[in-house]
Image (spheres, grey):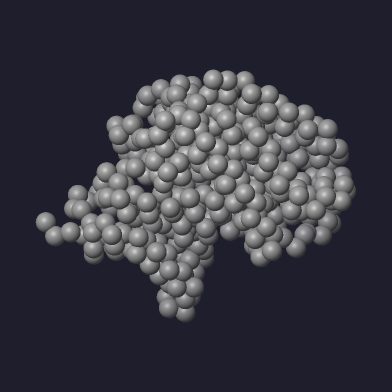
Amino acid sequence: MGILAAYFLMLILVAQYTSRGADTNTFFTANKQSPWYLVAFGMIGTSISGVTFISVPGAVGKDSFSYYQIILGNLVGYFIIATVLLPLYYKLNLISIYTYLEKRFGFWSYKTGAGFFLLARTLGSAARLFLAVQVLQLAIFDQLNVPFWLTSIITIGLIWIYTYKGGVKTIIVTDTLQTFFLLTALILTIILITNKLNINLSDLPNTISSSKYAKMFFFDDFSYKHHFAKDFFSGIFIAIVMTGLDQDLMQKNLTCKNLGEAQKNMFWFCVTFAIATLMFISLGSLLYIYTDQMGIALPAKSDQLYPMLALGGNFGIIAAVTFLLGITAATYASSDSALTALTTSFCIDFMNVEKLEESKRNKIKHNVHLGFSALFFIVILIFKAFSNQSIISVVFDIAGYTYGPLLGLFAYGLFLKTPVKDKLVPLICVVAPLLTFIIASNSESWFGGYKFGFEKLILNGLLTFIGLAIVRKNS
């Protein structure tokens, strides 16, 4: 408990330093003075989150290394972001990336795109935060007889405290620190487990690759939800929508001094992200190898495996402390930037604060920031009551249904020049996810056993694109 308290005190002190003289411009854009290397390193923590820290290692038992097929697709998606989307955003000098939709289509398209981002990020970030709150509850607050709802308030309150003033300028620095703690925790945990298994570090690659959990590529059965083509192409579009069409990740990129530095940031982020994710799935194989050798019964949910072993004394007190710091850093690096991005999007896209004087802008920004903090709390309690799935599956399901309309809107805007009937766009963007849900729910009976995986996102985006083409204006 003392170590975590010291950790949060450090974040608050950093926030105090970085928010000196901050105004709403600083909150939204960091005055476009962020060093690219800090942005690149901090984005690792934002992209990984508590879901990768817990769910990805846990999923190895069922899905082997198939998750890396998605990561390989992500790398292609990041290249598209760096060469297509970033030049567009810098050319238009955007604060909120969704203002592009107003320039391209009109008022209703703009509000629809921004609205889907708010929905997607609120649900996705709350799901990630829910996972971390569960761990903190199990490790610390249950012993103090603190109820789950209060743990949630404490967790969210700490995020609010260190982000409410400095915004994205503070986030870039705190996320850099949190990424350092996250990666340190990952490396130390791997070392501690290899010691328990009496494996030399030099033999580690061979031990992992020769295990029954190490299969990475699946080409045989196309109906399998993790067939290479499905995961790879889904990975491309997941990267495009959850990074390139997401205000959270793009807001950080747009704080770089110029396009060249933003593209340099994306390149180095790709390299480090790919390495870090490979280490996480390798950790997963080690966890399952350990349970096999020790005869330890697996928990009911794969998300519980890593917390159970780390906090249960299997690897010693250092591993327990390391795990808590790692999951806290991973989750806060993701959630703090999401809260800032949601605040920015709502203020710019719905409250039009850039047209107001600074005192009014600041007041609205504070109220919106507090409002989204409260909304996080409500959604976390809903997940507590109803979610029994692996959180990584929940996050990608949410992305498939909520980011799909954004994918369709931006794809149509970039590749077709014809205008659309703007007032019909909200209807198209609501119908497309509903059709996607109906098709995915019945695919096995309709398409000879075909089961949709993460490619629901592609289907959703395609249906949105087709709908926009149907309601295009005649030239």
Res. 103 image quadrant: top left
Report if residue 410 is visible in the image. no
Rendered position, 203 above or below 112: above
Q: Residue furthest bottom?
A: 445
Judge left or right: residue 118 versus residue 470: right
Judge left or right: residue 408 versus residue 121: left
Q: Position of residue 184 (x, y in %)?
A: 69, 31
Res. 187 image quadrant: top right
Report if residue 43 is visible in the image. yes
**Residue at 54% from the left image edge and 48% from the top image edge:** 68
Query: Which quarter shows the N terminus?
Result: top right
Q: Position of residue 364 (x, y in %)?
A: 50, 39
Q: Position of residue 377 (x, y in %)?
A: 65, 51
Res. 179 image quadrant: top right
Front residue of this view, candidates 243 and 71: 243
Query: Which quarter shows the C terminus?
Result: bottom left
Q: Residue furthest left?
A: 475
Front residue of this view, candidates 98 and 438: 98
Q: Position of residue 88 (x, y in %)?
A: 31, 36
**Residue at 30% from the left image edge and 34% from the top image edge:** 92
The total number of labels drawn is 0
**Residue at 55% from the left image edge and 37% from the top image edge:** 366
**Residue at 74% from the left image edge and 36% from the top image edge:** 325
